Image: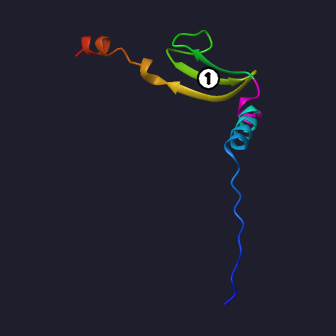
């Protein structure tokens, strides 16, 4: 049965810290650009009725839009007046 020889190298702590520091300093794709979270609403001239949108922007491009419909109602008190 043939034996396989493997070499295992373990860098010293200084080399490991230097490598980790270099990895942290490299830019990550999602960090490039100007990210911003913008609340549009609940009452805004561009929305019809009462709606809140939570927009995530990358520069001038909307990357995600989350509607918050908790502000929509049908006037339950007003409807109940006619019952």
As drawn, which residue projects farthest toward the bottom?
A: 1
Q: Is residue 29 above or below residue 75?
A: below
Residue in the picture at 69% in, 38% down: 17
Which part of the image, by quadrant, shows the C terminus?
Answer: top left
Which part of the image, by quadrant, shows the N terminus?
Answer: bottom right
Q: Is residue 61 above or below residue 49?
A: below
Residue in the picture at 64% in, 25% down: 56
Residue in the picture at 69% in, 47% down: 12
Give the quadrant of residue 74: top left
* Label 1 secondary element: strand
Q: Is residue 30 above or below residue 6?
A: above
Q: Is residue 79 above or below residue 25?
A: above
Give the quadrant of residue 77: top left
Q: Nearer the viewer, residue 64 or 34?
A: 34
On the image, the x and y values in percent for residue 30 come to 71, 33
Q: Residues within 10 Å of mark 1 (few under 14, many from 20)?
A: some
Q: Nearer the viewer, residue 38 or 31?
A: 31
Residue 32 left/right relative to 36: right
Q: Nearer the viewer, residue 14 or 22?
A: 14
Q: Give the prevailing secondary structure in the magenta stretch.
A: loop
On the image, the x and y values in percent for residue 72 come to 43, 19
Is 27 magenta? The answer is yes
Q: Which residues are magenta?
A: 26-33
Is 29 magenta? The answer is yes
On the image, the x and y values in percent for residue 28 come to 74, 35
Reading the image, the residue beneath label 1 is 55
Residue 35 left/right relative to 45: right
As drawn, which residue projects farthest toward the left?
A: 83
């Amino acid at each position: 049965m043939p034996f396989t020889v493997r070499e295992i190298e373990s860098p010293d702590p200084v080399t490991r810290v230097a490598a980790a520091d270099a990895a942290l300093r490299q830019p990550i794709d999602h960090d490039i650009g100007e990210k911003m979270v913008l609340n549009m609403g609940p009452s805004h001239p561009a929305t019809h009725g009462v709606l809140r949108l939570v927009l995530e922007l990358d520069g001038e491009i909307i990357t995600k839009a989350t509607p918050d419909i908790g502000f929509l109602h049908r006037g339950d008190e007003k409807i109940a007046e006619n019952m």
